[in-house]
Image (tube, rainbow, N blue to C red):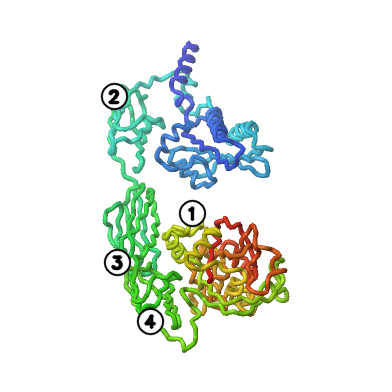
Amino acid sequence: MRKSLLFLILSLFLSFPVLARENTGDLAVMEIFFTGKELTNQQLGFLADDIREKAVEVTNFRVMSKDNILAILKDKKINLSSGGDPECDVEYGRILQADKLITSQIVNSAGACYLKLKLYDIKTANLDKSVSRETPSCDFGNLRRAVLDGVQDLLGGVVRVGEFKPGTVLARVAETLRVQPQGLGTLEINTQPDKCRIFIDSEDCGLSPRIIESIPAGERTVVLTRDGYVNSTEVVRIEKGKRVVLNKTLSPQTGSVLVSLSNPAFEQEKASVYLDGKYIGVLPREGRILKIGNILTGQHALRVDHPDYEPIEENIEIRHNATEQANLELKGKPGRILIASTPASAAVYLNGVQRGETPFSGNLIPGRHRLRVSLPRYNPTEQDIEIKPNRPLSVSLELEALPPGQKSYERAGMIFIPAGEFMMGCNEAYDHQCENDEKPYHRLYLDAYYIDKYETTVGEYEMCVGAGKCGKPDQGGYCNWKKEDREDHPVNCVDWYQADAYCHWKGERLPTEAEWEKAARGTQGLIYPWGNEFDCEKNEEDGTRLRVLSVLGGNDRDRYQDTAPVTCFISGVSPYGIFDLAGNVWEWVRDWYGDKYYQGSPARNPQGPPLGNLRGIRGGSWYNSIPTNFRASNRNSQDPLNRRAYTGFRCAR
């Protein structure tokens, strides 16, 4: 009789493994986080499987398989490995509806490998335990032993297989050697909406609507889940031979969003807000924040329209019971500008690019622009103009005639440099940054010439490409070509031959090193174009600029991440009023580079070595912004075929 009862107990144990082990909940195991190259993804998968198998061996938790986890996380963009953020790990466990969660990381440091395992209690959001193991190398065999040993230590104290909690059914059966028959019943589940995932006592039972038969009698916990809806948990009593019907409507998950604009103050009440194409309202007249509530979780399209700005649309992810932030920046529609001058037919330059003659009309993007108007025998005039979004602006200028016999120093955007002597090279007497290729400090005579006031811009170079006379620059990365709002930035990512072709297309040429240096430092031998002191904190007189140098690199230095518009930094101009001879981009010159050329160069109009492998570049750039590079005497060189994001050019005649 006793043997028969023991056989019956064993049969029950095998037939109902969940009951026999007194399952204490669900345990999820994340994939192993590893950034090194010593282990393959397949090996990392084997180690994660080792953690799961060891957890099955030493605990009574229901260990979720990787396939189960992938099925639950279907269509969710979640990294299966842990980056070490406890909040993210706990949230991951909640999504899986796990009771416990194991995360693991392997870190390679100085040749050794360090394994860290963590056990989280998802209900309390607490870290239960953490263990670490070290191996002398990232050998797969060593790590596998470390993983198995670490999991054994991590799960120590958790209920073991074969132990029965006091008061449970199997504990009473074991004590009395009696088995109470349970009986089976049926459960019918209907939901609104359909296709909710059904879990009965943590077992996946498919999608609703569904009739499930042969359920052991007693109280059963039914959990209903569906993406975008709040989980529903019901305790249902199953009776032998009876059908129980459960009808349940799930509440949708909702969140909210705060809509704000980062633009300066404008007529906000004209800004209309749409969500998924549906009109919501306008931004408040007072304040700049609009709250939209009761939005279903998931991806939504948020759009803001304004009559003076381009429509902007942004995808937002709404999470349950969370308030998202949507800070948008509207891009103003172009404004119309009308420029008149007395006398008429004067050349109009906007941001260094010739756009036509007066009277001139055209569209400009909103913001500050540099306007220059010039006419032979008249003094050129320059001023900053402010274009408002979708608004017209009229500018009327009266040009001042030059006195009889006086020549204008400006022609077609170029600056006239008179003939005469100047000092070239580095003066060791007061410049302590001299390099060998800048020596000796020597006197030169140059004939008169013209040189561009500004570096050649993207907009100017684009006209040469359109004429079929210039090759296209490289694009992507920090290259300005085909990048939005870079028309007035220097063209970069061009080689020496492209720069030379552009200047010839204009009927001009690249400047020689000597011409470039005289334009940069004048006849007084200045160290920098603006003087002899490197003062990067000096402000503009009108307070509108941050630095005296053309570009020091980075938003925290000159307001631009890389290159800047060529007309930005008037405080850094040379004695002849030429912009960006220090900074923005290095500039190609005509000469072949020779590091000892100064030791025997001609005293009049030097043209550089007759042959070479490298071409000269001058002036420093945003990319390598150290003071020594901005010195007017500093020399550098580059392969003429190189196209760098920090190299551009200007022309001379």
Which one is in front in this view, the residue at disc 1 or the one at disc 4?
4
Name the residue carrying label 1: 476
Q: Quadrant of residue 186?
A: top left
**Nearer mark to the viewer, of 2 and 1:** 1
Is residue 532 visible in the rendered image? The answer is no
Lower sequence index among marks 3 and 1: 3
Q: Which residue is mark 4?
A: 397
Nearer the viewer's eye, disc 3 or disc 4? Answer: 4
Give neighbour class at mark 3: few <14, some 14-19, many 20+ (Cα, 10 Å): some
User: Amino acid under label 3?
Assistant: Glu
239 over 371 or under it: above or below: above
Circle nearer the N terminus (4, 2): 2
Query: Left or right of 330: which side holds 552?
Result: right
Residue pointed to by mark 2: 242
Q: Earlier in the sequence, mark 2 or mark 1?
A: 2
**206 or 652, which is in the foreground?**
652
**Crowding at mark 4 (Cα within 10 Å: few <14, some 14-19, many 20+):** some
In the image, what residue type sits under mark 2? Lys
Location of residue 452 with respect to 235 vertically, above or below:
below
Closer to us: 167 or 25: 25
Give the quadrant of residue 310.
Answer: bottom left
C-alpha span from label 4 to label 2:
96 Å
Residue tagged 3: 269
Q: Residue, x 41% and y 34% (percent of image)?
A: 71
Q: CA distance from mark 2 to mark 3?
A: 63 Å
